[in-house]
Image (cartoon, rainbow, N blue to C red):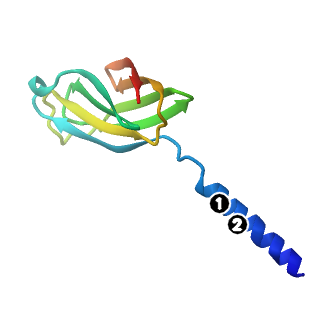
Amino acid sequence: MKSLYRGMAVAALAFTVAGCFTEPKPLIDEFTWESVENQNDITEGVTIAAFFRDISFLGQVKTPSLCYSATSRLSVDGTNLTLNIDITSSGSGTCNQQPGGVRYTGVVRNLSSGTYTVHIIQNVSGQGITEFNETVKL
């Protein structure tokens, strides 16, 4: 019976130690967005920058009204990172209907050293899709 408990303890320890050494998966962190009231304050496009093991991004887009919000998703295929940024209308009739914009920012974390292809697909509901590609070395 002692050897059974000892075997179970060794197996549990092996699983615990193995779990401690797995690398965390890449993820989008600190994703935030803000509504911009004056379209003149928007420079449309995306800026991507590498910093140690992270890739930061900042995007700006003009919108037909101030009734828009932004969400993000990350897909990883080896060294190819695809960020889907969906900018959607709230459909609210109570927000200001003047033209405006959305500014969003975030960080992709938990990356290993290497060269990555960053593909940002910015989908603005009612306006279409714009794609940005950049190669980044960490």
Q: How crowded is mark 2: few (under 14 residues within 10 Å), some or many (20 or more)?
A: few
Residue kind at label 2, given as amino acid type: Leu
Q: How crowded is mark 1: few (under 14 residues within 10 Å), some or many (20 or more)?
A: few
Q: In which quarter of the image is residue 95?
A: top left
Residue at the image position 52 percent from the left and 27 percent from the top: 79
42 is higher (above) or lower (below) than 53: above
71 is higher (above) or lower (below) than 120: below
Query: Residue 62, can we see it?
Result: yes
Marks 2 and 1: in contact by CB < 8 Å?
Answer: yes
98 is higher (above) or lower (below) than 110: above
Residue at the image position 39 percent from the left and 24 percent from the top: 136
Residue at the image position 46 percent from the left and 27 percent from the top: 82
Residue kind at label 1, given as amino acid type: Val
Q: Position of residue 131 (x, y in %)?
A: 38, 18
Q: Quadrant of residue 6?
A: bottom right
Q: Residue 13 carries which label?
A: 2
Give the quarter of the figure containing the C terminus.
Answer: top left
Q: What SS does tag 2 mark?
A: helix
Q: What SS does tag 1 mark?
A: helix
Direction from residue 38 to residue 23 in the image, left or right: right
Q: Name the residue under label 1.
A: 17
Q: What is the spatial separation of the Cα atoms under label 1 and label 2, in whole angstroms? A: 6 Å
Q: Where is residue 87 in the image (x, y as percent from the top left)?
A: 33, 32
